[in-house]
Image (cartoon, rainbow, N blue to C red):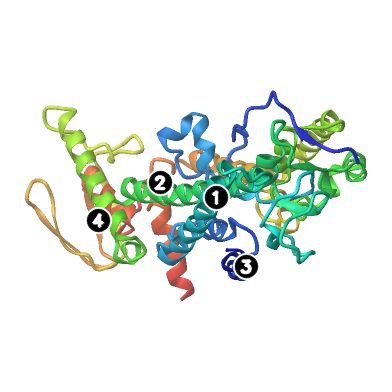
Amino acid sequence: MTRTVKTFWIWCAMFGEKALELVRELKRSQDGNLPPYNDDGIRQVVEEMRTLFEQNQLEVRATTDGERGLLSGIQLRHACLERNQRCLLAYVHHRMTRIRDYRWQTGSVLPPSFRLSLCEQEIQWFTRYNRSLATYMRSIAPTGLDLTQHLQPPKSLLVEVRCLEDYGEFEMEDGTVVLLHKNTQHYLPRSQCEPLIRQGVLEHIH
Amino acid sequence: MSSLTQSSSSTPSYSSGVPSSAAHYRQPPAAAGGAGDFFDLGDILASQQRVPAQFEQTVYRLGFLDAQSSGEHIQSGAKMELPLWLARALGGRRRNIVRIDLPKQYRQQQRDILRADANVVDLFKQGPYFYLMGVKLLFFDHMERSDLAKSLLETFLNRFRRIMDTSHHAFSSDVTMFTTRLDETERVLFHIGQRSVAAMEKWERGRSHRIEASDVVQKRRKRKRED
């Protein structure tokens, strides 16, 4: 048994290091972009936890059979298990928070670069979050209310905007179609172009 | 150096009261309670810092954790540097598996330096989470505990004035020499100060009603330009 644990020591200086690496990775990237979901890292931590758990079960069994002095080791491993658990939960939770913030900042469509760094479950979660948010926003007023709009109090109905990229045709609620070409300027209803400004397609100039 | 054992009165809570550096992300609603710090990345990193510890019991079959000996077991009396989270789990009153000493940067000698002039000390080098870690050390029962608490508070008060001044008035000058010496908590405060001044300036120029691209988009745009 000791031998298997010894090989394990070669790639792990101390229990919990792998899990901490995941946390460090998120901490480093706290400006905008989300690092890709670290499938491999998580698997390694779960592997480490499994080894710890199995070893602990062996020793608990030995203790109930009458062997003495093993309790401190069990305690140590248990602390490591809990630590790993905390790191993994923090990792998943933090990513979830970031994805949710993304929904509020840029809207219901994820840009491809962002989408690539999510794992399957996270994309599912995002879709479901979108759905609940939409259902809720439809339910709060007779006509529904978009909570993501007017994050700042509006001072005018129309705003002057400049296009920063070729967006193509943009159809407004009343059916008018505006062609958004790069470097053209338009005078548009504030509520309609707010999401585009947030996404960086338009620039608010006056 | 007298030893530390965890005081029984302190419940193992992760609350620290210090704003995480993720402050510009909205805190999740669930994080409002005490459980919130459980997920705090800064808190996790702070509790990784190592403290000198001495084993009081023999721990069987885990000798490979001690790089200094090749034995199969960790012998009673062995000295190791353990991460704080592990030391706390093993150094409780009911389970006296390890005894803990203060890390070097919190000892009397270092406290004297901080008392002489806290402003010149590079707290980042003393462990990027100097205050968070210091507060965690207070959970252990120790003769120097009240001295340490006093020292942490004094250090913070002495340094805070300069941090606030710099964050409010040094817009056009290079402050990197100053900010590299701040601990993580102080950095967060520094950035909050800078952001509030920027917001004030925007309001004074009458530009605060303008809709802006979201943070994420702005940062992505910057990155694109670098490519």
Q: How far apart are marks 1 and 2 (CA)?
A: 34 Å
Q: Which quadrant holds residue A8?
A: bottom right
**Distance between the Cα atoms at labels 1 and 3?**
16 Å
Answer whether labels 3 and 2 touch (C-beta < 8 Å).
Answer: no
* Residue drawn at x 73%, y 42% as measured from the top left: B97
Residue at 66% across / 57% down in the picture?
Answer: B61
Does residue B21 appear in the picture of this structure? Answer: no
Which amino acid lies under the numbered mark 4 shown in the image of this protein?
Val
Q: Mark 2 lies on which chain?
A: A
Say whether mark 4 and mark 3 are on the same chain. yes
- Whether discs 3 and 2 lie on one chain: the answer is yes
Return the disc, 3 or 2, that comes first in the chain's sequence.
Answer: 3
Disc 3: which residue: A6
Considering only vertical position in the picture, is B70 above or below A66? below
Badge nearest the viewer, 1 or 2: 1
Vertical arrangement, residue A108 with respect to residue B33, above or below: below
Q: Distance between the residues labelled 1 and 4?
A: 46 Å
Q: Would you name the residue on which mark 1 appears?
A: A56
